[in-house]
Image (spheres, rainbow, N blue to C red):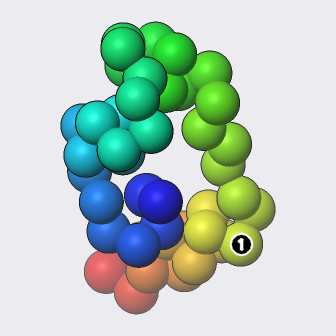
């Protein structure tokens, strides 16, 4: 859901996680997203 632009707080509210710790536990980074962000950093 974060990939769609929702904030962590919005995702937690939608998914029903009671704490940010639990949300982070079930949030997984995607390699494609990291590569894209690193590419954008290189352009700066």
Vertical arrangement, residue 3 with respect to residue 2, above or below: below
Vertical arrangement, residue 27 with respect to residue 41, above or below: above
Vertical arrangement, residue 9 with respect to residue 25, above or below: below
Name the image quarter holding residue 33.
bottom right
Relative to 19, 33 lies left or right: right
The residue under the point 52% across, 16% down is 22
| Nearer-the-camera pick, 43 or 14 | 14
Relative to 14, 42 lies left or right: right
Q: Is residue 18 visible?
A: yes
Q: Residues within 10 Å of mark 1 (few under 14, many from 20)?
A: few
The residue under the point 60% across, 38% down is 27
Q: Residue 16: horizontal and vertical position, in percent? A: 40, 29
Q: Residue 1: horizontal and vertical position, in percent? A: 47, 60
| Nearer-the-camera pick, 1 or 13 | 13
Q: Is residue 8 visible?
A: no
The residue under the point 75% across, 62% down is 31
The residue under the point 35% across, 44% down is 14
Name the residue beneath numbered marker 1. 32
Mark count: 1
Relative to 14, 23 lies left or right: right
Q: Residue 4: horizontal and vertical position, in percent? A: 41, 73
């Amino acid at each position: 859901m974060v990939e769609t632009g929702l904030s962590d707080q919005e995702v937690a509210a939608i998914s029903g996680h009671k704490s940010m710790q639990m949300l982070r536990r079930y949030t997984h980074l995607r390699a494609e997203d990291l590569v894209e962000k690193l590419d954008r950093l290189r352009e700066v």
